[in-house]
Amino acid sequence: MRQHNLAALLERLHRGGPASRSELGARTGISRSTVADLVQELVARGLATEAGSSTRSGPGRPSPVVSVRPEGAVVLAVELGVDSATVAAVGLGGVVIGESQEDLAPVRPTPAATLDLVARSVQSLAGDLPEGAVAGVGVAVPGLVRRSDGFVHLAPNLGWRDVPVGALLAERLAHLGHPGLDVLVANEADLGALGEHRRGAGQGHDNLVFVSGGIGIGAGLILDGRPMLGAAGYAGEAGHMLVNQAGRACSCGKVGCWETEAGEDALLGGAGGTTVDPAAAVWLGVGVGNLVNLLNPDVVVLGGCYAPVFDEIAPHVAEGMASRALTQNGAAAHVVPSALGRAAQLHGAAELCLADTLANPTLRRRS
Amino acid sequence: MRQHNLAALLERLHRGGPASRSELGARTGISRSTVADLVQELVARGLATEAGSSTRSGPGRPSPVVSVRPEGAVVLAVELGVDSATVAAVGLGGVVIGESQEDLAPVRPTPAATLDLVARSVQSLAGDLPEGAVAGVGVAVPGLVRRSDGFVHLAPNLGWRDVPVGALLAERLAHLGHPGLDVLVANEADLGALGEHRRGAGQGHDNLVFVSGGIGIGAGLILDGRPMLGAAGYAGEAGHMLVNQAGRACSCGKVGCWETEAGEDALLGGAGGTTVDPAAAVWLGVGVGNLVNLLNPDVVVLGGCYAPVFDEIAPHVAEGMASRALTQNGAAAHVVPSALGRAAQLHGAAELCLADTLANPTLRRRS
DNA sequence: GAGGAATTGTTTGGGACAAGAACAAATTGC
DNA sequence: GCAATTTGTTCTTGTCCCAAACAATTCCTC
């Protein structure tokens, strides 16, 4: 009970930002006296702070504002890209405390070399943090990931296959003086969805589809407010959905896959391209229409290579959608560009690792 | 807290069947003394009974078995079909207490005539039940339903459009002496999914897709153990997913929709047909493959017109799936026929209406 | 068949903790 | 300056879960 209430308060502060005590009580249905007690405990654990006075105008005794203390729990969020690896220290409340980016071009992104670099970045960012504040390391990988142990089956963009990323990174971190650190590895689109849902274009929408464009197309699903991973964790593999039977051959051996018709290569002529092929954008819309029919989301967030060219492709995407989506569903779904860009995955990774602490603030050691 | 624990026990009994007290305690983490107290309360409220002794062999004091008392909360579940309407009284634990089927052919299924018949069936079944035991009425409709008020936008099979089924049925029941009865209306595929998940082919599987074949194709989704309805409640409208560009024109004005290629008309040559068209079964598999890729379920349940011919179509469906599904997802998903047949919707409707009572046993009046 | 081991129901006391009431504090507006 | 308003604080109360000790009943072994 206590734990449940503590978690409710902390989560509210983490997601909804600072609030006064009485506001917290009103939102959560907890009495003022109990809120006082709980906030005191959160402060004692270093997870929250009370400061200043509210900006609320009107009569009544002024109330100090309760906020999360970002340094109370920090996640080192990693995003593995083809040409670079980004590491960020993200604290409670989604505050980015530090960030570093490593160029992967010189090392060719072999698993060993890449994770060496990442581990060093993590160490350097973690060095500035108080002991025990680090809640974990979260890694976003563009590929098929088994979450239970951070095993990457396949990451076509990186050219990786059967790489135990979780184990390899944990091992390197142990050598660098961070033994026992939790390393969670997850799919890039799933984390993008989570990031946009909590901190980006999907705030306030509990049914969201994140479409991540790259060499392949991945989808991340937030349904009913929760990330949906499927039975084995491979939900969202929408790239090989059939959209165009008369289309090109896909690397998977099939024909007409969504990602062949509307992936980065088709849309922009490969990575770095800037000229949009309208036909490819229409196929993107056809696929989005299928997803919208099936899942009835309120928001579809286009991320990855789609975000920068959103304005250009939007009308074609709408055309493709209109050709498939039922009106009652299509009308409900807003298609928007990613609001966070590459930071979506970092925020998603942070949310993933913070979930434990948020659900159970008692586990966090006092600092 | 109390309520939460009561609900946990009742739900366990409802879903998992009879169990001894200590078993309940072990499963839920509640201490023996508390379980005793809670069970006593459930019994006092008429929601559970203790009887006999366990069949467990081994040393130790024998333990009476706790079961739900089906009559403690009963739902009148209605399934509206094209040619008939079925009404069943389903009690706690999914026990069917009574059932009746009405032939709709003579009345042509106009809303008024159909609901008149249904209301009388409900009344007759409810008459045998103790006062206050009826937890609600649940209606499965093959069409687009707004759950909040039971408004049916469109039910092509019935030929209905913009019919306030919930209000009409509640009104009729009020006239028949059952005022204030909760009437919940939901889509037939969604309830089929729920029914198969709780009582049928999907037991023990938390990620399930129910594909309901009829004139159209509807999908019901259970993801992460919970029904997924989408933002507006229209999730699962998979019938107009694109599967065959070179296909026939669909009634929706588009071409190549899943339901045109693999619905009842295509597969069996219309309602009542028995000869299977293998090509249509392959298209069915293509659509299933798309769903499997996107949602990674452990089970796909084929219901409606697919269940009776499952053995015949299974190989063709597998062929279609193989042409689309990624191996790692395809391997995980078992395609099985509906285990409950038409009763799936009835059980789903019962689960829907019982959810309230299960979540909050205190609300139930003592009987 | 007697006694020990094992398992479970029962009783009792204690403790955690949330809620509510009463009061104090601090602001706004007249 | 005074009433009204809102919020923090203190104290009491009651709910309710748990742990421990004990009783009941069966199985197993000798």
Image: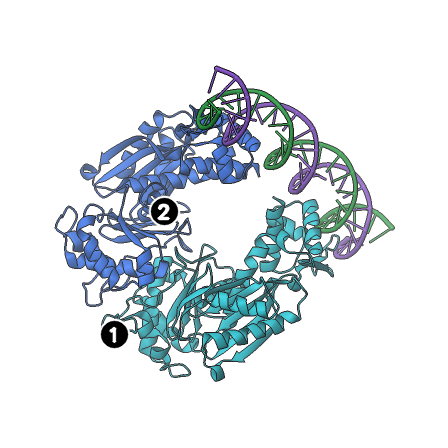
Chain colours: A cyan, B blue, C purple, D green
- Separation of residues labelled 2 and 1 (CA atoms): 41 Å
- Left or right: residue A75 versus residue A217 is right
Tell me residue D7's x, y (percent).
Answer: 71, 51
* Mark 2 surroundings within 10 Å by alpha-carbon count, few (fewer than 14), some (14 through 19), many (20 or more): many
Q: Amino acid at mark 2?
A: Phe
Marking on residue B25 = none
Residue topped by disc 2: B151
Label 2 vs label 1, nearer the camera: 1
Give the chain letter at badge 2. B
Give the SS element for disc 1.
Answer: loop
In the rendered view, tell whether residue B212 sits above or below residue A240. Answer: above
Kindly identify the residue that appears in the image at 46 percent across and 74 percent down. A111
The chain ID associated with circle 1 is A
The local crowd at label 1, few if under 14, some if 14 to 19, many if 20 or more residues have their Cα within 10 Å, is some
Q: Residue at x 40, y 55 (%)?
A: B230
Q: Amino acid at mark 1?
A: Gly
Above or below, comparing residue B323 to residue A264 in the picture:
above
Question: Where's residue B155, x and y in %?
Answer: 28, 49
**Residue at coordinates 62% horizontally, 55% vertically from top-left?**
A10
Q: Would residue A328 be visible to someone looking at this image?
A: no
Give the x, y percent position of residue C19. Answer: 65, 40
Left or right, B226 with respect to B254, comes to right
